[in-house]
Image (tube, helix red, strand yellow):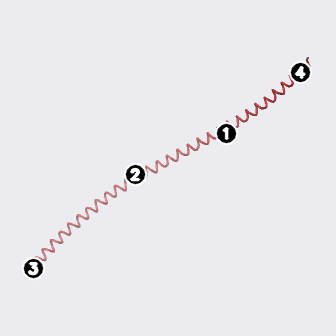
Amino acid sequence: DLKSEVDELRGSRHEATAESAALRGKLESAEEAAAQVLAAEESTRNEVSAGEAQVQELLSELSRAEENCTRESEAATHAAAQVAEVENARQALQEVWRSELTAQEDEHSEQM
């Protein structure tokens, strides 16, 4: 009969409304989850960008340190060469002094 059909349609409409509300809730949850994912993705991109900038700065520092090391190594090599020159000059001077001392001793011995 017509009344039972109307009741059945009302029941179906209530079920459809409840299902629609449930689906709306799921859609809102999915939208919130998507927004969180997008926010996390943006945050990750920012962190990666900051990390890349930090890596570039560290690479620049490393390059400067390598340049300083090279300069200091060259300076140390130059200083070592100068020390060797001074040592050679000292030894040569010491030999001259020994020769002079020996000559003076010989001269003194001859005079006596």
Residue under numbered circle 2? 67
Work out how far the residue at label 3 is from the one at label 1, CA to CA, in angstroms: 105 Å
Please give the label number shown on residue 109: 3
Vertical relation: 52 (above or below) 29: below
Residue under numbered circle 1? 36
Q: Nearer the viewer, residue 36 or 76?
A: 36
User: Mark 1 is on which residue type?
Assistant: Gln
User: Mark 3 is on which residue type?
Assistant: Ser
Residue under numbered circle 4? 6
User: Mark 2 is on which residue type?
Assistant: Glu
Work out how far the residue at label 4 is from the one at label 3, CA to CA, in angstroms: 149 Å
Q: Looking at the picture, how far across and down is residue 58, in whole percent?
A: 48, 49
Write the residue at 73% across / 33% down: 26
User: Mark 4 is on which residue type?
Assistant: Val
The N terminus appears in which quarter of the rendering?
A: top right
> Image quarter for residue 73?
bottom left
Q: Residues within 10 Å of mark 3 (few under 14, many from 20)?
A: few
